[in-house]
Image (cartoon, rainbow, N blue to C red):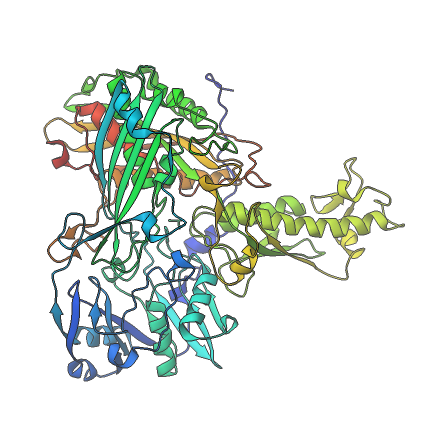
Amino acid sequence: MPEGGFSPIDARGTPRIDGRAKVTGGARYPSDMPVVNPAWAFLVTSAVSRGRIARMDLSEARAVPGVFGIMTHEDTAGQVADAGFFGGGGYGGTTIRPLEGPEVRHDGEIVAVALADSYETAREAGRRVRVEYEAEEPSSTFGSPGVTEKAAKEHSESHKDPEVGDADGAFAAAPVKVEARYGTPTQHHNAIELFTTTASWADGKLTVHEPSQFVHGLRNGLAKQFGMDPNDVRVVSEYIGGAFGGKGALTHRTALVALAAKRLGRPVKLVPTRDQCFTIGTYRAETRQEVKLAAGRDGKLQAFIHEGWEVTSRADPYKVAGTQTTSKVYACPNVRTKVTLVHADRNTPGFMRSPPEVPYMFGLESAMDELAHALKMDPVELRRVNDTDREPIKGLPYTSRSLMRCYDAAAQAFGWAGRNPEPRSTRRGEWLVGWGCATAIYPTFLGPATARVTLTPQGHARVQTAGHDIGTGLYTVLAIMASERLGLPVEKVAVEMGDTELPPAPVAGGSNNTASLSNAVVQACEQIRARVAEAAARADDGPLKGRDPSSLRFVDGALRAPDGAGEPIDGAMGRAANGAIEAYVEWAPEGTPPGGVRKLHQGMAVLGGGLEGEKSVSAAFGAEFVEVRVHERTREVRVPRIVGAFAAGRVVNPRAARSQLMGGMIWGIGSALHEATEIDERSARYVNDNLAEYLIPVNADIGDVEVIMLPEEGDGSNPLGIKGLGELGNVGTNAAVANAVFHATGVRVRDLPIRLESLL
Ligand code: MOS
């Protein structure tokens, strides 16, 4: 064990079983799927953000050779039913339904679909569609005339703003306090794979190839839109080229492509343009926040007040409400929070990696740094005196919590002890050097999950479940799980996912899939083991005769007793079955309401647990330390190094986990310094809707990234003690960078991203 007392997890782990297919082009992404004789769709999207279509002239578009037709609201209204909003028991990421009428609700709403014999022809026709609008003045964002504000709890009875004690009174009375407003920008997922759809019909049945985080949700939503039996809809999404939350809920383009395919009697393919993907899907909405923190001279929090305002569409009450998380991070007797939704003429926002935590933890963790400065206290020590094993709202215990172990491990690796606390105290030539840190937290969500595992006497296994590897390494994780329990090398396990023909799995969101599906797969393996073990123990002529079946395990291709006695897998299996053995399991986490698995079969995302549990709360934690250099004259900000230490229960594949956490921190640096969708406030339109102007870090922007994973055994949130970590890494980074910038320059930037002009 190295000095300082932490022994990190060896990050070597297992290479991805799908890695080779992905880098050799062998992996087929949904738009790669060959279909016979397809037609192509090209979307026409609105040029105004609010108003109505007065007139459409399709004559030029229809005259393009090779055009099959142009779908508009005039021939399409009434043909696609409402799929409902996912937040209200439905399937859609929005209830805004294009082509249902002449109204335009946001910039880039679909107003027509051109269909033709090639992509180029469809695009040419699409560009010749003439639309005349009666435009109205749109409301674009906070402060725009005409926006409507409504408290989150007025939208839904289930929403409760966490609150305890008398926060305002305690704040007024406390000796040390900070109070500040923070802002986070609009962001778009910008997955490299666009929102493609390929739809085909045969014998009244619909097949859709589309990148998705939730094929069963998409299937059931489509069935609802077309009044079909869900069993007559198949959705396939074997590989996904980036999702980040943007491919979780149904978007309306799918139904339009399916409808086009039905009308034309041939498959239809859609590959939208990059700029269209800014408006036909979801995004991370901008937030404004007000944070008040008060403490005694000892640093112990006495009051915490966190209010948030979030932009959403007029139609849908989408919210992230990150106060559900921020109110539970530190011990504090008096907490008040409130979330307000601000409705504007915008497309409906949606999940984007760590949806509540990325914006709201920026507010909390910046304010904690401001408080540490006001107290003249080390920021790490401030977290230590406020560390807690119980969340402060209801007093429920954390299933496990290693926040301070993460701080200590990362601080040591970073060399934090050598920090001069004085802002603007350290320089290297013309560069001001700053060090900052912040907490990362991500709730442990779990959902009912089903899986089928098949073991052959030849020692091959197959795992089937409709979960999704959205780059997280889930294919490999499930192979590891089956390989351990069935005593086979990982290469002997085939994993099939991303198809509604497979047993349903929860949405690949909320970082739940690894935990939820591993539990289901392990239980299926256990059923197979038990069946073989019982037969082997009963067999008079076998080497395991009379053994306690529960003591027998699959090890290295054999069924073995603890003393080493055993029988090769084919022999042992032959005592239980004539061929392969298959087990189908429906797993539900503790506390799942009745009907949870049924809802899963109906394509409903039913995630539970996290920080809103009944008896306990569960989250993964981390601590991130950042060094920035700010050029004294140009104000250019660089991040030469970042160190993060994380604890997330049992880490199944350290290699993939490290890459998730590293990717999260890199995204975090981009989020802190580069990334923002710019909105033209007069027109409520996105301006930089392309990868040239939507800034993300390139390799040259990223210095040393160190990931430390700490073991956290025996977490009780689920039988395997796995916590999700896919969304953990980018949670603390925004604030850690901003805090380091303050330390370097003495300038506190409270609005992201931090740019040259923020530091003038
Ligand atoms: Mo993740 S943003 O919950 O798909």
In the rendered view, would you say 43 is above or below 409? below
In this rendering, the count of numbered labels is 0
Residue 717 found in image quarter: top right
Q: Nearer the viewer, residue 675 or 311?
A: 311
- Which residue is the extreme one toward the right? 540
Q: Nearer the viewer, residue 355 or 289?
A: 289
Residue 415 seen in the current view: no
Q: Nearer the viewer, residue 552 or 355?
A: 355
Q: Name the residue at 29% across, 26% down.
A: 169
Q: Name the residue at 78% across, 56% down.
A: 576
Horizontal arrangement in the rendering, residue 294 relative to residue 213 (left or right)? left
In the rendered view, would you say 302 is above or below 360? above
Image coords of residue 568 (percent x, y) = 76, 48
Image coords of residue 351 (percent x, y) = 35, 51
Residue 662 found in image quarter: top left
Residue 676 seen in the current view: yes
In the rendered image, the quadrant that contains the C terminus is top left
Horizontal arrangement in the rendering, residue 406 relative to residue 698 (left or right)? right
Horizontal arrangement in the rendering, residue 415 relative to residue 489 (left or right)? left
Image coords of residue 386 (percent x, y) = 39, 23
In the rendered view, would you say 270 is above or below 281? below
